[in-house]
Every structure is written in C-alpha cells, then in structure tokens.
Image: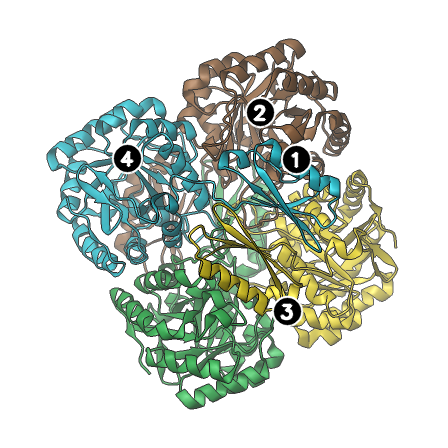
Chain colours: A brown, B cyan, C yellow, D green
Amino acid sequence: MMIVMRPTATEAEVQAVIDRIEAVGARAHPSRGDEVTVIGAIGDREHVARLELEGAPGVAQVVPILKPYKLSSNQFRAGEPSVVEIDGRRVGGEHFSLIAGPCTVESRDQLMTTAHAVQEAGASLLRGGAYKPRTSPYAFQGLGQEGLRLLAEAKAETGMPIVTECMDARDLEPVLEVADVIQIGARNMQNYPLLAEIGRSGCPVMIKRGLSATLEELLMAAEYVLKEGNPNVLLCERGIRTFETAYRFTLDLMAVPVLKQMTHLPVIVDPSHAAGRRDLVLPLSLAAAAIGADGIIVEVHPNPDEAICDGPQQLYADAFSDYAVQVERAAALAGKALSAA
Amino acid sequence: MMIVMRPTATEAEVQAVIDRIEAVGARAHPSRGDEVTVIGAIGDREHVARLELEGAPGVAQVVPILKPYKLSSNQFRAGEPSVVEIDGRRVGGEHFSLIAGPCTVESRDQLMTTAHAVQEAGASLLRGGAYKPRTSPYAFQGLGQEGLRLLAEAKAETGMPIVTECMDARDLEPVLEVADVIQIGARNMQNYPLLAEIGRSGCPVMIKRGLSATLEELLMAAEYVLKEGNPNVLLCERGIRTFETAYRFTLDLMAVPVLKQMTHLPVIVDPSHAAGRRDLVLPLSLAAAAIGADGIIVEVHPNPDEAICDGPQQLYADAFSDYAVQVERAAALAGKALSAA
Amino acid sequence: MMIVMRPTATEAEVQAVIDRIEAVGARAHPSRGDEVTVIGAIGDREHVARLELEGAPGVAQVVPILKPYKLSSNQFRAGEPSVVEIDGRRVGGEHFSLIAGPCTVESRDQLMTTAHAVQEAGASLLRGGAYKPRTSPYAFQGLGQEGLRLLAEAKAETGMPIVTECMDARDLEPVLEVADVIQIGARNMQNYPLLAEIGRSGCPVMIKRGLSATLEELLMAAEYVLKEGNPNVLLCERGIRTFETAYRFTLDLMAVPVLKQMTHLPVIVDPSHAAGRRDLVLPLSLAAAAIGADGIIVEVHPNPDEAICDGPQQLYADAFSDYAVQVERAAALAGKALSAA
Amino acid sequence: MMIVMRPTATEAEVQAVIDRIEAVGARAHPSRGDEVTVIGAIGDREHVARLELEGAPGVAQVVPILKPYKLSSNQFRAGEPSVVEIDGRRVGGEHFSLIAGPCTVESRDQLMTTAHAVQEAGASLLRGGAYKPRTSPYAFQGLGQEGLRLLAEAKAETGMPIVTECMDARDLEPVLEVADVIQIGARNMQNYPLLAEIGRSGCPVMIKRGLSATLEELLMAAEYVLKEGNPNVLLCERGIRTFETAYRFTLDLMAVPVLKQMTHLPVIVDPSHAAGRRDLVLPLSLAAAAIGADGIIVEVHPNPDEAICDGPQQLYADAFSDYAVQVERAAALAGKALSAA
C-alpha cells in the first residue's frame, strides 16, 4: 500500500502515518519527493487492511498495491484456469457450458419438456428456480420445497445436474439435497453469512455479480466461499446498472476478458436477465461466447407467453437447438468446445 | 398499466395483448391512434403484476400507471407522515433525530465514552455495530454476541435506545433482545427473507438504500416489512454508486424531498458512509438537515485514529456537541426540532 | 404522449392539462380510471414537444409515445438498413467495415507504414487524428493542418478513404478537403452547431456516443445532421461511464442490437478507446463483430511503445492481418462479410 | 507518478519502464518489494503526461501522484479562495450570489418583469438564454441575436450584469458585447476550442459540469480557460447521470465541499436543471447553500405555465422574494452573506 501525503503535510503528519503503519505490524518506507512524500506500507493483507488511513491528517490518497483477493487471484494458481467438475461435467478451461432451463419451476410438465429439449440440444446443466427473489412481495415467490422436489425428479429422469438458487441459509439443507450448483443471485452477492455457509458445504456455487458490484467485489464474494475450503466457484456476469433506459441492465461483456486476467475462476454470462427480452438473447449470447466466456446460463420455456415469471425473456424450448448450434460456433472463435455430458 | 404497441403491430398482436390482459383477470381498454395503439390494463396490483408483456410481439413499451408499492405510499396515509415511536423517542414528522455512536463496538470503554458524549449533545438513539458486513473475509467482522452484550450494558447505563445491524435471520433472536431499531445494511436491502422475518418481529427497522437501488426498490423493500404488519420502518439514504472517483459514494440528497412525496415513512441520512472522510461529515449533515431529512445517523468515536474499522470517517466524541448545535440549526430551516429523549 | 395524473388530481388540474394540450395545437383524449386519469395528447412531434407538462399541478408522469427521432428511425426507411457509400466502399447492410489507423498522425513514416499494413490486411478506411481533443491543455493537441496534409498524402498513395475528427466548425473547410468521413468525438456528440454545419456539408459523418449519452440522445444527434439533408451518418459505440474502475470505459455492446431495432443507420464499434489496453482489443472486437456491428474502428501503430498518444491501446501494425482474419470470422457469425475496396 | 508492476513482471519489463520514463525526460525511482516492484516517475506534468504506460508489458497499475490540474488547484493560491469580480458584484469567498432569470429569453415583457422581480429580491446577476442547446433539432433553439438585444436592454434598465450561454465560437463576438459572464453548458464542458477562445477573451465564464464529468475533468476544463490568462472562472454543479429514474439528474451536492478542497474557484449550484421540477428547487437550494456553495443559479419566469422552454422547473417570479429569504438563511449556516449589488 502506498500512502501519498498532501503537498502541505507537516513532518508530524508524516510521522503519524509511519507510526500507524508500524502499530499494525507492517513496515513503513517513506520516500520524500520535491512536492510530495509517498510512504510505502509493506506487510501482509491482514495487517495492511487494518491501516484505515484514508482521510487521516495530511493524507492525500491511499493506493492499494496488493490486491485484496488472494485465493481467487490468477497468481494463486500460477495462471492456470480452474476447471470445476460438476457431476462429471467440466466448467472452465477449454469447455463451454450451456446451462439452460426455465426461470421458475412451474409444473412437472413445464420442467420435463424443457429439460428434455435443452438436453437434446447439448446443454450440460439444467437450471430452474424454486426460491425466487422478487422485487415485489406481491409477486409469485416460487414453488419452494415443491419446486425442489420437481427438480430432483428432472434430475432423476434426465441425469442432468441441477443449478438452483438459495436465498436463505435456513433453506440450505433441503437445497443441498437437490442442487449440484447453488446459485447466489445478484441481490445476495454480498450476503456474507450465506456465502460462508455455502463455502462450508463444499457444494459448487455460481455467484452472480451484483447490479453495481465492481469486479474486485465479485472476487471478494468468491473469497468468502474459497476461504472456507470450497474451491468450486463459478462467477456470473448478468448486467449492471447504468443510466441507459433502453434496456433493463447493461450486460458488461468487458468483464469477461478482464476477469480472466484477474482470476482463475470460470466466468459464465447470463444474457436473459440483462436483456429482459428474448430478441436480444441470441446476439448477446454470440458476443459472450466470442469474447471468451466459459458458458452461458439462459432461460428456456416450452410456452413463454404463459410463463408465470419473466416470460418475455425466455427462449422457446423448441427453438433452443438452433440457438445452441450458433452459440457453439461463436465459442469456437474463442477456442472453446461445448462441454459434453 | 398502459401497453404501447409498435406502429407496425398487427391486429392479431393487439388482440393477443388484450387476451393476455383478460387472462390474468384485468380489463383491457384499447385506444387506437393514427400511428400507434395504446391499451390500458385496469385491475389490481396482483393481477397487473402478472402481465409480463415487455417484449411481447408487437409491444413497444409497457408503462406502469399504478405504483407497485402500496403500504409505504403517501396515499396509504392520505399524505400524513408516519411518526415512529422508539422507546419514547419520536422519529418523523416535525422531529429531527440524531442517531450517533461508534461504527463498531470495540470495547466497554469505547462504547460508554461515546454513548455519554452523544447523549449529552442531544442524540436520541445510540448506534453501534456488533455484526459488521465487510467486503473482505480477512477484515474484522465485529464482536458478535459480545458486542450485543456491551450494547445492552450501554442501554442500561444511559437509557438510550439501541440501533444495531442484523445480517442473518439466524441471529435475529439475540439481536432482538438488545435492539430497539434493527438496521438493514445497504448490501441486505434486497435480502427478502430477512426483511420478512423482521417484519414478523414487529421491531422497528431502518432500511438502508442499496448502492444502486432506485427509490422505488427501496420502498419495495419496506413493503416486505410492512406487509407482515410491522409499520415501524425508517428509510436511510447512505450514498449511491456513480462514475465519480473523488469520493467513496455519492450522497443522493435529492432522494430526501422526492421520498417525502412518495412515502409517509421517515427518511434518515447517513453522511459518514457516503463520505468515508470526517471532514465532509459536517457539510453533508447541514445539507441533509436543510433539505428536510428526519434525522442523521453518524459515526462517533472517542479516538478515531485508533478505531478498528472506518476510523477516518468517525467524528471525535469530544467535538460532537459543536456538531450537534450546527445540525440542529440547519434542521430548523426545514421546520424540524431536535427530538428529545 | 400520455399524461398520467396523480390520484389526488382535482378536476381543475385535469382541465388545465387538457387546455394546455389544446393550446399547443394538439388534441386531448382523457380517460378516467378508478384510481387515476390518463390524458392522451395527439399531435405531431413539434406540437407535443412544446407541452412541457412534467411537474405541472396534478401531473404524476408524462409518458412519450412517439419517439422524438424521426429521420433516423427504422420506420423512416420501413425497416430497410442504410448503406452509406464512401468513395466506393460500402458501410452497413451485409458489409463489415474495418476502419484502422493510428490514433494521431505523428509523421509521414508512421502514417504510411500503418496505412499500407492495414490496407493489406483488408481495412477499407484509414483513420488518423489531426485535431485531438485532450482532457489536459498541457497534452499534445495533434499536428493540425500538417496532419491533414499527411492524411491527404496517405490517401493519394493508398487510395484509402480517410476518417478524421473535426472539433471546431471553424476548421471544417480544411478538414473537408481531406476527409471522406468526418468523425465527431464523444465529447462533441451534443455540439449542435457543429453537427448542423456538417449536415449542411453533405460529407459522411461518424458520430461517437457521448460517455453518458442514451441511445435516444445519440439518435437525436444524428437527427441534427439528417435534418440538414445529409443522410450519410454512421453511429459509433465507444464505451460509457459506469462505476467500474477496472477499465477505462464500459463498452456497451448491447447498444448494437438495440440500435439496430431503433434505427436504419450503420453502427460501428470502437474497442480501442473503451479498453485503453491492447490486450482487450481482440476479444472486444470479436464480440462486437459477433453481435452484429457494421464495422470496427481500431487504432494501429507501427511502434505503439513510442506513440505520442494512447500508445497502450494501439495494435501493432505487423500483427494487424492476424487480427483482421479473426474479426472477419466473427462477423460471418452475424451474416456479414468484409467490405472490400 | 507511481508505476506498479505485476508480480510476474520480468526484469526486462521493469527496465523497459525505467527507460521509457527517462526517455520523456523524467527520473525513475524503482523500489523493489517482496511481491511487487513500484517505480516512481519524478518530473513535471508535461513530461509525466507523455508516459502512457497503462497496459505496457508487466505494468499492473499507473497511479498519478501529482494532480493534472495546476492553475485551478488550491495550492496555486496557497489555499486562498478566488473572488471573481463581475461588474462590481463579487462571487466567491464569503459572498453568496443569487443568479436568477428566465431559462430562455422569450420577449421584452417576460424578461423585464423577471429582471425587476429578481433584482428586488436580492439577486445579483441576471441569467437568460439567447442560444439554447436542445436535444431535439425540432425544439425551439432560442431567439439568438434578438435575445442578446433584449438582454442588453434589461441590463441597461436594471444595471444587472448578464449571464448568458455561448455554444459556438463563431457567435462569441456578439455574445461578448452583452455578457458579463459567459455560460458554458454541460454539453460543451469539453468543447476545448470554445473554452480556449473564451480564455483569450478574458470575459468571466461559468463552466457547467458535464453529465458524467468527474470533478477532475471539470477542473481540466477550467484549466483550458485559465491557461489563456483568464482567471475569472466559476464552476457549476447541475446534476449528473445515475441509474435513478425518479428525477431528471442527480444533483451531486457532495461536489461542493470536495471542490472546495481541490480548487480556489467559486462553486455555483443549479438546482433547476437537476430537478426539472419546481417543487424540488427550494429544498435543493437550501441544501446547496447550507453545504457551502458560493451561489445558486435558478430559473424564474413570470408565468411558467406558458414558458416556451422548461416551464415546469421555473419558479414564479412573484414568489421569488420568499425563496430568496430562505436561501439567504441557509447560506448563513455556511458563513456566507448575500452578495449585494
């Protein structure tokens, strides 16, 4: 960490900073320039994190040198990307994963029809929501336990691993009985007790980036899981908030190559929630695959016009295989091949 | 809700929208203009919320007419502001509340010194964190149960009601034993199971606006509490995320008068977290009071330079009474007087 | 335009709105619901634009129905995309255009080496800045007239049409002598006198989206050119401002398919300025081509490490043909082929 | 400037950075830590600005130490605030300036009525637009030269100095004949040729912050004027763009105290354009005054309901003196008194 002093900082203020650095157990390396003094603080993350020198008397700027994330950093695996194994399917590396299924589990029929359609088209994992975080308490909140039961049935019938959301640590036990990957929604990206609990479970987890979370914060969320000894973390870009009103969220595809430089963890893209509109899903998916994403999570429904939730963004199940063929071609541009069952 | 059709929409597409409206139990009122057709959907919130017509064939735009929030809306109380009573202290209406105390409970000494200082200066509630949501899993996470015990002691000694954060529904029981107001942090604004649980508890709650939450979403979070029969909700503006890098967050003071038009709930401002720097706290507090906030929640520490957490933004306890005098004067501009014990 | 009244609006307030609508020459269509009254205002853009009813007594919301842009809208050409012809090269439709060259014209040598390299690799237009808008008045401002002279030479030698920026209507005459496409930079997107002047010149123009401009505002900027009778307008997405600090700007690729639905004008993507870093240029370019952009404008330099300006983001001239081959493949996914000379 | 190398940077990459630093005429101070090497680049702004090391091989981060602005920095005047004198009125320091008048000059009558009303209420400068930057080319663009003539008349009659916008360097001459302060609108904040031209004129100028401009960029715009030898620069905060849709712009009042720390230039706040609604103007003005702004620029009209432009946000001329009394009281909280004629 570098502490840049103000040009007007007094010698006493410089000394106070040095004292504070030494008080937390780090070493101070002042270097006095013509206009300003810069003080390096050398020590481990835990020490340096306790400095809290922003805004201290005479301090102009505090510049972190070491990244605050550690287990998720690319250095931690010497630049080697992680490949997460999920019931035999591989996510990451040269594998491109199609994760598909309905937004919400609505009925046995809806789920099975979709599961078979996406499986035949080459999807490697089945998604489906039993617990749904809804902005409005008056909206449908998911089938809950009944939804989990249907997902278990779909898994038994198709053999596809299940991706489903958990919003509450108190529901974790029943969710773990069904889920092969637990989804942490964007709203829960910084629900630290939940992340730590899932970390302790060892179950693979896909963490969605919060609506205004920086990439560094996304990695710090992953760090909460990794720190508990669970290495099976997938990251997911699903759109951020900007001033633009022509779309629901702004899908930040630039996050993909930049995350690849920061971390060894696989990066999935969710085009459905960003767009909120079916007609944008294919172009966004092609771009996501071409830019190097490790997979796409996409919503599919046998009859979107009658969906209980997010109908307008769900792909038609019977058009899914066409979609998959095109996305596969785009993934090839980035050197990835469809992950097989 | 108004559904605006595209100029190119076919008669069949118009009819499909009408059918969908009637299928959810609402009434459709089409009006055909020279260039476009607009269809009104008349029905209650629950019906209309199920329409999901965005992006449907031929649909250009879906415009909500009724607000999605109900119990928090100004109409619900016919324009009468809510006054929340907390152990004899009143928040809202013509009362201006100073909520002050350390960021984190660190020790008996630190807490008691601060409690006495802010009480003497006219603060009506004591804040202090026992559970701290930290971006980094490597950072100090709060004293937990021991922190709650110290808060209970401070309350016994000073008689001040306690504001403290709860991050996990599994901790709610012990928190309820101490807290007079439960704080929901910005990161948990959309933690719906937690909000509903606190709603069921009946305990007053202060909900902080998420970093990129719209005012409407803040009210929807309140709605999760209110719907469970708990009317004691305070809202809190604490800074939003923008492109500006000169400060930690951008305190959105405009939210105060606009929320006053939308809702009857009291609005508190947190200048400490937005600024992250002590020297901005006073000017931001004056502005917050002058613009009509119902109170300020501010961090105070006997010795901020040695604080474990957020030291740079905490006010010096011994300078707090000067601060309080100035803020009181600014509140008077907006017609409010310091809420007394 | 629909004017949604507040539930508390009085009859007099409703009548005042109706009067205002009729006063500007439009027709009012009130429809009175159980909770709120909605008033349609029917008339042409010019009339309705003068209404200014936002915030009028009793008015809750003003919802535009007709888009404010007209000549740039997809309807204006009945859904037929525009193909702009630039000295024999076609931009738009099924053509994919590579526009390449140095950020700034620095010397004869630098420009000629780059021009030949990009031409051989299949670029159809040569870019190069003579006038550079720089955030700092202390930074290099471009070679000016001398830069224009060198661009003219490059054009004479290679036959490539020239894309170069004009920042000041007073420079327009000399720029027009060299430019085949005038670039309007992001900072000048709303420099209306400049846009209108270029509109009158008839010269093709590429308008870059402002850092926080909505797509609608970008189209309104185009409208200033189109209104003067100049149909040769290209739009360019070059990154917007968000809270993310891991990259210079956030390239908004979602803008491409959405603009395609709004307008018939070709859409170009600039990956160099968004990224500010060479290593992101290829993945962003692949994504831009795959999502359906009509072309890419990219910075290339024979020796970026010695570039006067924006060196870190410029591609190496001798690696450009590899780059072009990959981008061409991505464009094919969206059904486009490299535009030939 | 500090160049932070990647942990994986090779010795050759470190040396290349050192060479580059020396090549631009600055000195390099490498300091090699356990995990990373940090290289200080010492030299003047012009040298260091040419480094362009972002994204160079092995470089992780480039951290500016010296601010890029110089003449506008607080250091330049040793912490002494600038007081700009405008025809006998003082702006800055302990003076609080009310700048008021119609959005657009519409007619002799409208202008004179407003001018007298605001003068009697204590406004020190009269604002009024003759040239209006409008998002739509179909909207009213201002009276132009006729508007300037009316402003000259109002000045002759009331003696009030005039604030009016210039959008085009080609109009500067006639504008200078009338204007005592030239306004640079938000859209033109980075119109550098225009800024430099006004710098050469010596006329006082008020620069509005662009919709997504950082405070540093605002100061760099001021720097373009100051560099030409014109010290009479006022800065103006008028709302930025965020994700919030409940208001037109988000007035960033935090910019006021932070700018005060960065620069000696006076800071004015424009509540009218941020809000777009009359009912928010008073609370925003109180907050702006309480937080330490040097003045407010506000729109006033004798009959806003019939205004050609921005009617909904203009204050009623006959209510202006009440407004002024309240704002004056709020300014007193920040230690400022109304600037007299």
The residue that label 1 is drawn on is B19
Q: Earlier in the sequence, mark 1 or mark 4?
A: 1
Disc sitting over residue C63 in the figure: none
- Residue A69 seen in the figure: yes
Q: At label 4, which amino acid type do we have? A: Pro
Q: CA distance from mark 3 to mark 1?
A: 46 Å
Find residue A11 and report its horizontal and vertical position in percent. 28, 55
Q: Nearer the viewer, mark 1 or mark 2?
A: 1
Q: Are marks 3 and 1 on the same chain?
A: no
Report the front residue among A312 and A227.
Answer: A312
Crowding near the residue tagged with mark 2, few <14, some 14–19, many ≥20 C-alpha atoms within 10 Å: many
Q: Quadrant of the C terminus of chain B?
A: top left
Q: Is residue C208 left or right of residue A206?
A: right
Say what amino acid the circle numbered 2 marks: Thr
Chain of residue at mark 2: A
Residue drawn at 36 percent across, 73 percent down = D320
Label 4: chain letter? B
Instruction: Nearest to the eye among marks 1 and 4: give it.
Output: 1
The Cα atoms of the two marked residues, 4 and 3, are separated by 53 Å
Residue type at mark 1 is Asp
Residue B133: which quarter of the image? top left
Q: Quadrant of residue A1?
A: top left
Q: Position of residue D12 (x, y in %)?
A: 60, 43
Measured as percent of width and height from the top left, residue D123 is found at 36, 77
What is the C-alpha distance between the residues marked 2 and 3? 48 Å
Check chain identity for marks 2 and 4: say if they share one: no
Query: What amino acid is found at the position of numbered circle 3 in the picture?
Result: Tyr
Residue assigned mark 4: B204
Q: Tell me the residue that label 3 is attached to.
A: C192
Helix, strand or loop at label 2? It is loop
| Picture disc at residue A104 | 2
